[in-house]
Amino acid sequence: MDILGLLKNNAAGSGGVARDRLKSLLVRDRAGCSYTVLEMLKTDILNVISGYMEIDEDELDIRLTRGMDVPVLYANIPVRGMRTAKTV
């Protein structure tokens, strides 16, 4: 493959990333959920789940997407293992 082919593939990838970011922004806007609120929600979800499971944060994917008629919170949280039971 020549250099022009590599540049073309990189531009297509950049366009896809920009399109995904715009979709995410539009969904958050329609749901009335700011970026800050979404980040706080992610942190809260991780704090709760981390008490029970070991999570692979490098592969974590939590986002707000558009469902049929409403925004949908999508969470793909890879679990490395379970934590030992806590006694109260």
Image: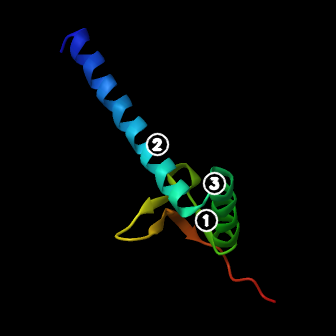
Q: Residue at x 27, y 24 (%)?
A: 9
Give the quarter of the image for residue 68. Answer: bottom left
Tag 1 residue = 54
Q: Residue at x 30, y 16 (%)?
A: 7
Which amino acid does the dot numbered 3 rest on? Ser
Q: Which mark is residue 21?
A: 2
Q: Give the camera-side residue of 23 and 12.
A: 23
**Label 3 crowd (10 A; few <14 / some 14-19 / many >=20):** few
Q: What SS does tag 1 mark?
A: strand
Q: Residue farthest to the top?
A: 3
Tag 3 residue = 34
Quarter of the figure that contains the N terminus: top left
Counting from the top left corner in percent of width and height, residue 80 is at 53, 63
Q: Nearer the viewer, mark 3 or mark 1?
A: 3
Q: Is residue 75 above or below residue 57?
A: below
* Disc 1 to disc 2, C-alpha distance: 29 Å
Q: What SS does tag 3 mark?
A: loop
